[in-house]
Amino acid sequence: MPYFLTSTILFLLGLGIIYWVHSQYHMDIVVTPAEPPADAPLISVCVPARNEEKNIRRCVESLLAQTYPNFEVIVLDDRSTDGTARILDELITADSKVSRLSLQRRETLGSRLSILHGSDLPSGWAGKPHALYQAAASARGEWLCFVDADTFAAPEALASCYVKAIETKADLFTIMTFQELGSFWEKVLMPLVMTALSVGFSPRKVNDPSRRDAVANGQFIMIKRAVYDAIGGHEAVKDQIVEDKAISEQVKWNGYRLIIAEGYQMARTRMYTSLAGMWEGWTKNIYLGLRDTPSMLMLGAFGATLSLIAALFLPVWPLLGFLWLLKGGGMMAIGVITKALIVWGALLWARANVSRGLGISRLYALTVPIGAGMFAAIMLTSAWKVLSGRGVTWKGRRYDPAGSQARHK
């Protein structure tokens, strides 16, 4: 009887948690393709690039192909040590050659692309805020659009996002981009990470001006230049590695309108291409989220616990029931097996829907124990870094526990 009662409690808890976790993602605002407005203010697209030779060409070319009629693209090469600078030079040269043959081209693409070379990182600054600070300083637009170098915009992205920003009266408008998942490990881990983010940062709460919940997706952010200047720009968040969340907090907490929307049709992002890259990136991101807010540390511990249960206990649960049945457990053992299989079925159904939404095979739902184990390890590593006071390393730079730049690696 104790085994049966324990199994029943776990059954009810399991179904409740699965439903709760997978019901947090409510993206009520969706950006769909829209025609460019007749009165189009200048939008300055700022792209920080540090060691982005794999992505920068595709990123810049997608931005230069926008249907929006009035924009400029500013790429800040943040002292890259790979082939980023060479590729940017090739893009400028290609535009120059074509512009000599076409007046129309010269009036559009050739005059829209600017390449800046970043200065040394000052003490007290994190790398990305400093790069965007430099890019924004040379921008001329009424709106600024910050786009990560691993993000690739659809031709109508600027026009559609601007139209939706005006429609929603946003001062800062950000979209969730479609995540491109190529490798096996991306497809195993990233769906779980995206689900965890929807739990930690509910879009409905973020869009509610009466709540303090604030987050933005640094892969694509549009902000009014006047608002950007009013909150102090990136200088106000100069020591924050997760600068997008910090900027969103400055915007919302100062009474401006923050909107987050689904923009899967507008832009695609390939965040990481290897397990090592995902480990470094998400350990850093989760570390900073746990460090900044004590409540997030508790949520992180809860998430790690759930992940460990999914990774270790769920696969064993029906097996324990089967062993009990072999030892004479009778109908109670069958009940344990049935409840375990129902929970498994509910979890696989929910994860299959997540996989479908991310454009990967539903069969990746079967990798939940592996992904959950990896996610738990990342969460625990991040929590350990918080509690031990250790810093993090990102893009070849090491940051101290306070978040400011400590030294180049």
Image (spheres, rainbow, N blue to C red):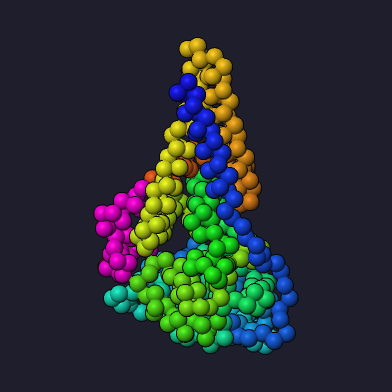
Q: Residue furthest top?
A: 328
Work out whether 380 lies above or below 328. Answer: below
Residue 362 image position (x, y, % from top left): 62, 42
Q: In x, y percent, where is residue 68?
A: 67, 79
What count of labels does the image hold? Answer: 0
Examine the rendering and report whether any part of residue 121 can be seen: yes
Quadrant position of residue 332:
top right
Q: Residue at x 56, y 85 (%)?
A: 141
Please indicate whether residue 159 sits to the left or right of residue 327 in the image. right
**379 on left or right of 4:** left
Q: Is residue 319 visible?
A: no
- Where's the C terminus, which quadrant? bottom left
Residue 152 x/y as whole percent: 58, 66
Q: Is residue 397 magenta?
A: yes
Part of the protein shown in magenta: 380-406
Q: Nearer the viewer, residue 152 or 173?
A: 173
